[in-house]
Amino acid sequence: MMRSKVEALEERSKSSLVQLHTERAILERMVYKNKNQHRRCSYFQYLLKVRRDLRLLQSAKSGGLNEFLLSSDNWQGSPNRELIF
């Protein structure tokens, strides 16, 4: 039973990461096309912050964070498992 829950969480996580990667690519293209025109606007500055955060998230993901979060040994006694997924 626990193994099937972990597998389901892994599958959801993988599909979410694929979707996040696609949306990040769209954001990168938007920033590339509009950076010179809108770089001083406050809304564009917030967009650049989102871009930086997504880069940090991707670097953390490639650093093994995803494997750590999905490991069932790390969740024993943790009350906030549902909040992450």
Image (cartoon, rainbow, N blue to C red):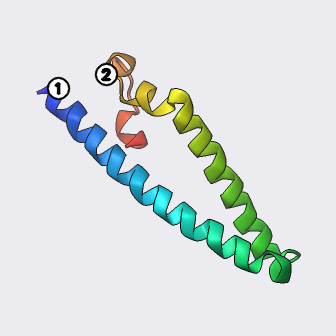
Q: Is residue 76 left or right of residue 32?
A: left
Residue at the image position 47 percent from the left and 63 percent from the top: 22
- Pick whichever, 37 or 74, lies toward us: 37
- Count neighbours of disc 1 (C-alpha within 10 A) and say few if under 14, some if 14 to 19, many if 20 or more: few
Q: Is residue 63 above or below residue 82?
A: above
Residue type at mark 1: give it. Met
Mark number, residue 72 = 2
Residue at the image position 39 percent from the left and 23 percent from the top: 78
Residue 60's spot in the image, x, y percent? 58, 36
Q: How many marks?
A: 2
Quarter of the figure that contains the C terminus: top left
Mark number, residue 2 = 1
Q: Is residue 27 left or right of residue 76?
A: right
Residue 50's spot in the image, x, y percent? 67, 59
- Pick whichever, 53 or 85, lies toward us: 53
Q: Is residue 82 left or right of residue 35?
A: left
